[in-house]
Image (spheres, helix red, strand yellow):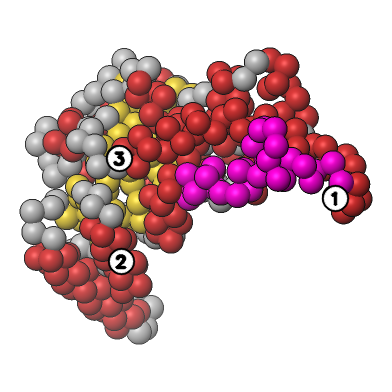
Amino acid sequence: MTGPLSELIRSKRCILVCGGGGVGKTTISASLAIAAARIRSRVLVLTIDPSHRLLQAFGYPDALLHSGGEPLELSSAVKEALQVPASAGLSIAVLNPRYVIDGIVDQTLSPSKAGNLRKTVLYREMTQMIHGLQEYTAYEWVTRMISEDRYDLIVLDTPPAFHAKEFFNAPGKIRNLMESRVFQIFLPKTGSWFRSMISFSWIEKLLGEGLFRESVLFFETFFSLRDRILARCQDLAAFFKSETVGVVAVGTPELAATHELEGLAGFLREKKIPLRAIVINQVEMPDVGRWEEEVPPELPSGFPDKLKQLAEHHQARSERSLAVLERLRQGYSGLPVVAVPMSYSADGFVILRNNSITLI
């Protein structure tokens, strides 16, 4: 296969799919994974989108992977519906930050320290409190699976475009937090000025004795993870620029979506993160002739005029779509700019199957 994204699929270990809300990014991620499964033997598509649309795209109920966890390989029946070889290893997973953090804690701390840390309120609420933790845990999971050589290719479905920028900034944000005074003042060092204050009863009264003691326990225990997290952030800052990683931006021909896509492309350029391809989804193709072929022999009065107006509207949308594609191809010469046609099928597997053929 020598399609527009076939080389990207063959050569990378991880493809990051980015784009705005409503552009079909999750569908494109799933379609890329399906296309890859026809070429490579072990493929994982992973989402950190909290809506869990990836599960719906593959026909699974939300509850099945709602809590996250280890990847789940698609059944033979689903592979057959997607025209993927039965021997291909195509799996899906939904990121659960708590699941990943629990794994890090178990790898780093003794069982007694890990147990004490998990009992604290701060730990239980940590995934909501620490900005960037979701993105950081996505890195942890993807890079762990790559290092363990569990998959030949991982397709990562990232959050919508505004959050996608946060996704790429997450290593710096986590590093800043780990180096902030919040952690510094809880350093377990004798003689620190803060350590001399924490026994003051007024602080306990302010926070409440239970929360105060839990806070001290949380920071002192979690500090044991700090060096590991800082080291990982340093590695992850370079992850996006690796030759084994490819970033694909997804948009639609709509004006707002195109502007959002170009904003994301500019952000990546500023960060010196190479953009490997652009996918324009939901493109109206010029097929006006089909309207005439589908005209029934007997029509109500005025129906032919309405049908003609509909065909003209479709033609106008098609012309705008093609103009957007041409402008992007000129503006991003050297990059594959792939058009994925608008699909009107009610069968999600048909859409995924057709998209996967278009992409590769």
Q: Which residue is mark 2?
A: 263
Q: Earlier in the sequence, mark 1 or mark 3?
A: 1
Query: With 42 as the anchor, is 312 left or right in this view?
Result: left
Please name which of the two marks, 1 or 3, marks the residue nearer to the observer. Answer: 1
Image quadrant occupied by the N terminus: top left
- Based on the picture, tell me whether residue 187 belongs to the magenta stretch: yes
Q: Earlier in the sequence, mark 3 or mark 2?
A: 3
What main secondary structure does the magenta stretch of the protein show? loop
Looking at the rendered structure, the kind of residue marked 1 is Ile
Vertical order, 73 against 283 (above or below): above
Front residue (pair 25, 77) = 25
Residue 120 image point, x, y percent:
77, 34
Residue at the front extreme? 191
- Tell me the crowding category of disc 3: few under 14, some 14 to 19, or many 20 or more residues within 10 angstroms, Cα based: few
Looking at the rendered structure, the secondary structure element under dot 1 is helix
Q: Which residue is mark 1?
A: 203
Q: From mark 2 to mark 1, how far is it between C-alphas?
A: 46 Å
